[in-house]
Image (cartoon, rainbow, N blue to C red):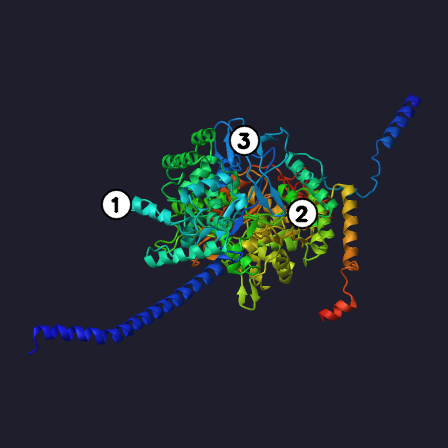
Amino acid sequence: MRGFCLFALFCSLCLLVTGCPKKPTLTKPKPRKPRVVRPVPPIPSGPEALNPKREASQNMIRVGEHYLSEGNLDKAVQTFQEAINIDTENGVAYYYLAKGLYQKQNYDDALGVLEKSEALLANYSDWVAEIKRLRNQIQETKANPPPSLQQTEYQKWIYH
Amino acid sequence: MPSRLQKEDLRKRFRSVTPKRNRRRFVGRLLLLFFIFVGFGTIAVGLKLKNLEKTVEEKFSTARRWNIPSRIYSDTEYLYPGVDIHQRALVTKLERLGYRQVAGEIKGPGDFLVSPAHIDIFLHDFAYPLEKFAGFPVRLDINRSVIIKMSDVESGETLSLVRLEPEEIAIIFDAKMEDRTLISLKEAPSQLLEAVILVEDERFFKHKGVDPIAILRAALADLLHLRLVQGGSTLTQQLVKNFFLSPQKSLRRKFNEALMAIIIERKHTKGEILEAYLNEIYLGQRGPSSVTGVAEAAKHYFAKNVNQLTLGESALLAGMIRNPSEYSPIRNKQRAKERRNLVLNKMLEAHVIDEKAYKMAVAEEIITPKPKIKPVVAPYFIDFLKQQLSSLYPQDVLEAEGLKIFTTLDMTVQTEADQSLTQGLANLEKQYGSILPKNHADLLQGCIVVISPQNGYVRAMVGGRDYTASQFNRCTQGMRQPGSTFKPFVYLTAMTPKRSKKLFTPATLVEDKKFTINTVQGPWSPENYDGKEHGTITVRKALEASYNIATAKIALDTGLEEIVETAREAGIISPLTAVPSIALGAFEVTPLEMAGAYTLFPNLGLRAEPLSVIHVMNSDGEVLEKKTLKIKRVFDEAPTALTTQLMKGVLDRGTAAAARAMGFSAPAAGKTGTTSEYRDAWFVGFTPQILSLVWVGFDDNVPTQMSGARGALPIWTSLMKKIAGNATQDFPFPKNIIQVEIDPDTGMEATKKCPKVFLEFFIEDTEPKEKCPHGK
């Protein structure tokens, strides 16, 4: 009997000990980041011919490139502008227009048009690099114009 | 008394003595008189001849014998697979371009054929700046009004792009109003030359300016018929009459005409005379201007270049010289046919053509282009253009040098804009007649500007409802208060971290509660149009519902000088003062200025300078003026994209939600504008590709009692449904724009327990950090 009582006491103690609530740990709640959605660009502005309009504009760019390689800058610029007129969201057309304007030594307009190209081609790393290279080139040339554009001392004397 | 004999004797004696001396004297005097007369006559004729010769040489021998009017052209139309020919009103466009609808098959330049499955067009030749285009036949395969394939009919080659030449939208004439296209003798087809000579002056190569045989023959014919049936004037005389003299009939004029014809024949070759004749001859009337010269007539009557005329058409043109209005194929095809056949018969008899050619020409159907219903299109745009050109070219140069001015105008959009304004204003008068002022002297007015925001091309301009009644261009000359259409510039400044004194996001809360501020002009307290206060609201709600009090508070917190700076950078050049009322558009601008400023929104902060002229070319094809795109970054991408998203809400939920109810479903953004006492009603709205502005009001500023949503929005919606359709393309976003779910009432981050959730746009790291209090 005594044995039984001791066993019952032991069990009650065990129950008492295990039944105690655990001391709460004081940890700061983790800040939950809001559910962020990144809006998808509505239409790619790269060279891929995703619709006939873009294809027509790309073909026009190819014609313009031909003029550019021939040194027919006026015609090239006109053709690139037409490519933009066909598809105003073709970032490549703006890039080539900037290139044509740069070659025509129209630096400010070229930089402005290049901005547009950059905005449209932001998701195309190759093009972004190409745009950066052209921008540096334009800025460099603008800062140090080729000798033909610099006035000689004689010209300065004549004009002033 | 002397006897009879004595008298006889006296007479004889008198005769024999006195007359001998007197007669000699008399004859001498007579001779002297004669020589004096002859001498003076010779001098007078000599002087007259000298004078005439001088006149002839001065006018005829100069390189430019005629004033050639300058022509203004619209932009080129581009066709490619995917273009909806109904939306672009292709058939109407072809008719406006002078193409002739034919049945069966297209045979030559200017023909087009419409069938259910395809449209065949034989393109015109056209001299573009820096390029001469030679027309060829193309086929457009159509499926449910959409072009699915394009090919060259001759080679079968598939084409990715087809250009339709620009439309002639205006001609700048001198006082004579003569429409003329110059050609050289080489350009004129030989059959036309033969026909003209045969009909008008058979002995052209035989006479020296005046043909006595022809005069005699004409006189005989007239006598025989007892009326004037035949003229005896040579081709040279006709040229003299048209070129130098007045059309009045008098002997003096006839005499001068003959003398001048002889002078011209002495000084110039037959070829030069014939070339001048072909360019000078009057061949009909087109509205107030005359169709002069065979080249212009070929365009007018057959929509062809002169070198493309068939034998039948050449014969008809030659036959029309006698009476252009009677034999005009546009007015009376049957009479024109009879006249043509008569000329052809004459050509056959004179062995100029053979039997086979004759038969073919007689069998030819006379096809003329559809006459233009409205001879003057886009008159307000033309005035605006002339004003711009006047700084580059004086009026006399524009009237005489034959310049070709290529513009950015899209004729399809212009036509739609014209119709939308006229119809829209009429609808408003009908629908809101009860609230419009009674017995107002002037009609309700309006204006529309349409711009392609990406490149700045001005696509359409309607400066008023009726140009004939009022030439005042409300788009470019009308200075009006923009009202709430200016608010987006306030919000753009407020959401630009670099510029605003206090940064706002679309979810920032503002108080829409009345307040008063002391200004230089005295205390100022803005009020909402509904006269109510709306408590604490988000920035988005303030713009979507166009609350004035909340906007004024945002403006004051943002900085008024900063807002002026934003407006300036956006391209507003009208005077602006940094006063609180600027936030509500209490200053004056032109609608064109406002439309230009709005281009930075769909362009993500880049401003494309509005362009209306692209090229100016002289009559030799040399390009005098080239305009390239002028694009400049004036704002960061992210705040511009946010403002655009807020303006999208204006259409989807806000003051312009009626546009959606009217069936316009394309992704678009915009802002309504109403000025105090409802004097001006505005709406400026845009899709990613096209921007249009509508203003409605009275010229004398009398209140219309119409808000922007009521007055301008229905016109804008009707226009955009036609020109933008129900496109699905949405606005672009820069990389640092994110979307976060928020509670629209508190502007805080939404939790699952929030009753309302809205997916809001933020510049990264400006999103709300606190959760909404609901359910706490």
Residue extending furthest left?
B1
Question: Amino acid under label 1?
Answer: Leu
Instruction: Evaluate whether residue B659 shows in this view.
Output: no
Disc 2 from disc 1: Cα separation: 65 Å
Crowd around label 1: few <14 · some 14–19 · many ≥20 (10 Å): few
Crowd around label 3: few <14 · some 14–19 · many ≥20 (10 Å): many
Residue extending furthest top?
A1
Nearer-N-terminus badge (1/3) = 3
Residue matched to label 1: B226
Image position, residue A32 (x, y; %): 76, 41
Q: Are marks 1 and 3 on the same chain?
A: yes
Disc 3 from disc 2: Cα separation: 29 Å
Question: Amino acid under label 3?
Answer: Asp
Q: Nearer the viewer, mark 1 or mark 3?
A: 1
Instruction: Evaluate whether residue A18 shows in this view.
Output: yes
Q: Nearer the viewer, mark 2 or mark 1?
A: 1
Crowd around label 2: few <14 · some 14–19 · many ≥20 (10 Å): some
Q: Is residue A42 above or below residue B26?
A: above
Q: Secondary structure at mark 3?
A: strand
Q: Is residue B519 above or below residue B713?
A: below
Residue extending furthest right?
A3
Q: Could you tell me if the residues under marks 1 and 3 are in contact, i.e. CB atoms within 8 Å?
A: no
Q: Could you tell me if the residues under marks 2 and 1 are in contact, i.e. CB atoms within 8 Å?
A: no
Which of the chains bears the disc numbered 3?
B
Residue matched to label 2: A75
Residue matched to label 3: B120
Which of the chains bears the disc numbered 1?
B
Q: Quadrant of the C terminus of chain B?
A: top right
Q: Could you tell me if the residues under marks 3 and 2 are in contact, i.e. CB atoms within 8 Å?
A: no
Q: Are marks 3 and 2 on the same chain?
A: no
Disc 1 from disc 3: Cα separation: 54 Å
